Amino acid sequence: MKKYHFKHVFLLSIALLVIHVPAKRAYADLSVGYINFISRHIQDHIELAIRSDQFQCWGEVIQELTLLPAHYAQRSHRPIWFNAFGIHPGAFEMLEVIRNASLHGLRPHDYHFYALNEILYHIQGPYIPMDSPTPGDWAAFDILLTDAFLTLGSHMTLGRVNPENLYTDWRLPRIHMDLVAILKKISMPGELSLAMDKLNPSHPQYNRLRNALRKMQHIQMQGGWPHIPGVPFVRPKSSDFRVITLRERLHLSGDLPVMIDSDKESQVYDPRLVKAVKSFQKRHGLKPDGVVGPKTLIALNVSPKQLLTKIELNIERLRWLPYDLGKRYIWVNTAGYYLKVIEKDRQVMSMRVVVGRPARRTPVFSTSMTYMVLNPYWTVPPRLAREDILPHLVQEPDYIKNNGFRIFNGWAHDSEELDAAAIDWKSIEKNTFPFRLRQDPGPENFLGKIKFMFPNKYNVYLHDTPNRNLFKKTRRSFSSGCIRVEDAPGLAVYLVKNDNRWGRNTLEKILKSQTRTVVLLKDPLPVHLIYLTAWVDDKGKLQIREDIYHRDQVLETALAKGPIRSSSKNGDFDRHFEKISQISDEI
């Protein structure tokens, strides 16, 4: 990899001016013959790379090993970004897009930014260099810019890494984007910038997080915020020398919008500052008690640089989502412990949820909810029966009877029902638990009164629960993978609001009867189980949450390695990608 020293920084500063105001000086002779000579250099570069399986240009590693050679071959290796009239306006637009990549949580140097600007200075800087541009210079500029377009376009639509290579419980449909087709359509000034912008995720959360990223970048550039020393606790109405630092810290993060001059030197933990601390605690999923305890102090001392990284990780996760979430859908953020129902980008329902504990993580995937079951049976999954129920059976002889369970000798529909009292539970080994347990409908049913079904390989679903106390907790990761919802009846009524066969009164009567009833949804709707540890709420406030499943560090490590070279065939990065051709058609 080429190293950039002081000379290159100077050249870059000149080249940045060139991007905005192209120099008014003669180009090298770009006659048809000279263009053909450049084409020959492009062809030689690519053929050498194919033979050596090590594609480098101007000291830079070329990332796109399939699309780039194929596209140049289709056009007889003619340059893409310039012709006999000079450099195409789209080239300058592309350089500007790369320069602004950091505003999207991406790194300009991953897309040859410094090398491209150095070559550009050599080709058309404000001063004629000692050695005139060579055909190899022009060829290198064209190849690097094409690779930058293909790589950056891929990262915008797919993300920098494939989550399925990082997590075994992450399955989302991926987007197949024909970047070469988009590149072929770009001919007029302004088209490239518009095309690249359309490659970004369409979800409103994307732009919200981008704005939060920009604000955090500004705070970082201004020197960040102060570290609060010492040990907790700082309590309301107390006096502490750290209150001055605390007040400044919360003002910089926006939790204390107005700083009164008379308070700047006050060590009194006054009501205005208590309110600001509670705001901060709510944004971080902490108990909003106004006390600067251990967890609050740790969160306060997270630096802007660390938050920048966290925001970038979650911007990356947004790129993994399906491009079209649906006009109406259910959105469950397991890291945030909440469920939202969205219609036309507007929230129409929200509730708290309980998700899988770290040992039994709730997976990430998208599918469609097709039916719900009123007064459901709960057939205990084998793992839960072995690990959770069997210890109770050993300790409590009447556990089966007291909790409404029935026991069968197998999983077939006609399996024989057994008498639990006749079984010596102490002799049953956990690894060979041979029975099927089923809990009948009733007030103690583990699934509550309703379960909401969207068939998936993980056997995960939404359901009601008789245990309401867990919804009062700030951290709600207690389930075995399924998701317990706070207002199951309200969600059920919403799901059938356009179905004349059902209504609130009908549903209530069925629920009271304790009769198991399957309700097929007239309008199935998408369900997206996602994982965001940072997002911006509807009020514009940045929300930060604990990484309960330790997924952030895995992703951060993967992104730190830099872009992964693609060896894809025809742009199809994954056979599971969802083809969304309308994006290309709109550009």
Image (cartoon, rainbow, N blue to C red):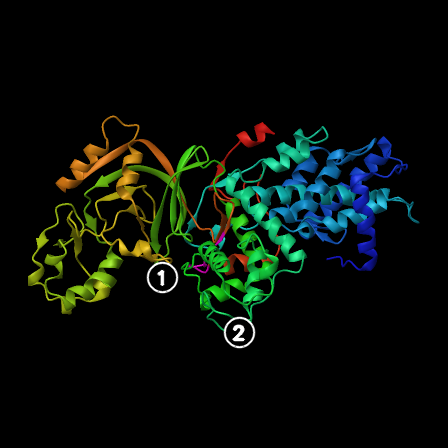
Determine whether 166 is above or below 94 in the image.
Answer: below
Residue type at numbered disc 1: Ala
Which element is circle 1 on? Answer: helix
Please tell me which residue is depicted at 49% across the width and 49% down the height of the picture.
535
Q: Judge whether residue 561 can be spotted in this image.
A: no
Percent x, y of residue 325: 45, 37
Is 116 positioned to the left or the right of 341 in the image? Answer: right
Within the image, what quadrant is residue 571 found in?
Answer: top right
Whether 328 is among the magenta residues is no
Nearer to us in this view, 156 or 383 = 156
Q: Give the CA distance from mark 1 to mark 2.
A: 34 Å
Percent x, y of residue 237: 46, 66
Q: Can you identify the residue that label 2 sits on?
A: 230
Percent x, y of residue 267: 55, 68
Within the image, what quadrant is residue 340 found in?
Answer: top left
Nearer to us in this view, 162 or 228 = 228
Residue type at numbered disc 2: Gly
Determine whether 236 is above or below 505 in the image.
Answer: below
Percent x, y of residue 396: 13, 66
Q: Can you identify the residue that label 1 sits on?
A: 359
Which tag, 1 or 2, sits closer to the chain's start?
2
Q: Which residues are magenta?
A: 543-550
Determine whether 247 is above or below 164 in the image.
Answer: below
Is 102 positioned to the left or the right of 288 in the image? Answer: right
Query: Among all residues in the image, which is located at the extreme front?
Result: 262
Query: Among all residues in the image, which is located at the extreme bottom?
Result: 230
Q: Residues within 10 Å of mark 2 (few under 14, many from 20)?
A: few
